[in-house]
Image: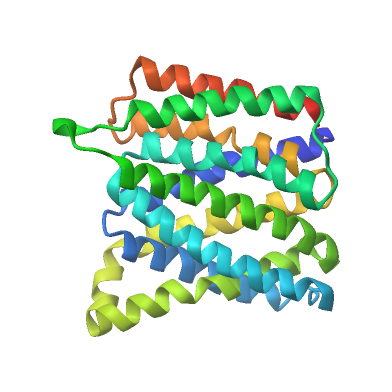
Amino acid sequence: MTPLVTLAVLAAAITHAGWNAIAHHIKDQLLSFTLISGGGALIGLALALFAPLPAAGAWPYLVVSAGLHVGYMVLLMRSFTLGDFGQMYPIARGTAPLVVTVLAALFLDEVPGGWQLLGVAVACAGLTGMALWGIRGKGGAPQWPALLAAMGTGLAIAGYTVVDGVGVRASGTPIGYIAWLMVLEGVSIPAYALWTRRGALLPQLRPYAARGFLGAALSVGAYGLVLWAQTKAPLAPIAALRESSIIVGAAIGAFFFKERFGAPRIAAAALMAVGIGLMLRAG
């Protein structure tokens, strides 16, 4: 984890929280993710014109990752529809580095040391606190569907993080890899939206086009930085540092969406941040 890699991942964390906030702000989540996914596909096509084609060994990973990304988008849409941004975002992002640590140890022989294991335990405590604080929302209604969607999002993130960590190393071209990944993953949600909304889709998209394409550009930039970093350092500390976006997301939820964060959520988010810091120290 050189200073340059660290700066790249921190920049990715900030831009990632930004595009997620844009996605949440557009209340019709299908329109939001149609613009972000479709915009990402267009950016990917533009990059593919100038970047080398990924090596043959990377394409199976690209296909699997594209499927995982589509699942991630669907679950993220669901969690943003059902819950507060300031709660759903930390849960989704906080789940990922814990699972990545386990998967990297099992499949890539990147075995965690004592500090990393301690970090996993502390982050798990924070994640549990963040989830339990929101089991009941307004009127005491259970919030399990939102929490399960957020945790499912985290599992999808962990899955594509490991797949892409191997795939981008095999590709020989991080830019080519991110370009084709954006193309492959970016067509499913717009195609579904076109099929369900038909002629009404374009008029519905028009008022949100500028925000949606800004979100797409931030999304491509954020993940491109992460993929480049994964060619330079082990996966677990990168995943941990990337989730410093939890703090950015919590701040966005409180200040821009006027969501009540409260002392219990602050304490839980702080525990998650400390755990992620310990995992990063291990890297």
How far from the left and from the top, in percent, is residue 39?
Answer: 49, 68
Q: Is residue 260 above or below residue 204?
A: above
Instruction: Judge from the rendering whether residue 158 lies leftward or rightward of residue 131; answer left or right.
Output: right
Q: Is residue 162 above or below residue 251?
A: below
Residue 176, by quadrant, is: bottom right
Q: In this figure, which colouring scheme has been used for the structure?
A: rainbow
Quadrant location of the N terminus in the rendered image? top right
- Give the residue at the far front of this rendering: 106
Residue 198, by quadrant, is: bottom left
Compare residues 125 and 22 and report the one nearer the observer. Answer: 125
Q: How many marks?
A: 0
Taking the spot 83% from the left edge, 74% from the top edge, the residue there is 57
Q: Is residue 180 visible?
A: no
Taking the spot 54% from the left edge, 36% from the top edge, the residue there is 94
Residue 102, by quadrant, is: top right
Quadrant location of the C terminus in the rendered image? top right
Compare residues 62 and 137 and report the one nearer the observer. Answer: 137
Q: Is residue 56 above or below residue 152?
A: below
Q: Is residue 36 above or below residue 196?
A: above
Instruction: Judge from the rendering whether residue 207 lies leftward or rightward of residue 161; answer left or right.
Output: left
Taking the spot 73% from the left edge, 29% from the top edge, the residue there is 280
Instruction: Judge from the rendering whether residue 50 lies leftward or rightward of residue 29; answer left or right.
Output: right
- Give the residue at the far left of this rendering: 139
How far from the left and from the top, in percent, is residue 64?
Answer: 65, 69
Taking the spot 53% from the left edge, 66% from the top edge, the residue there is 40
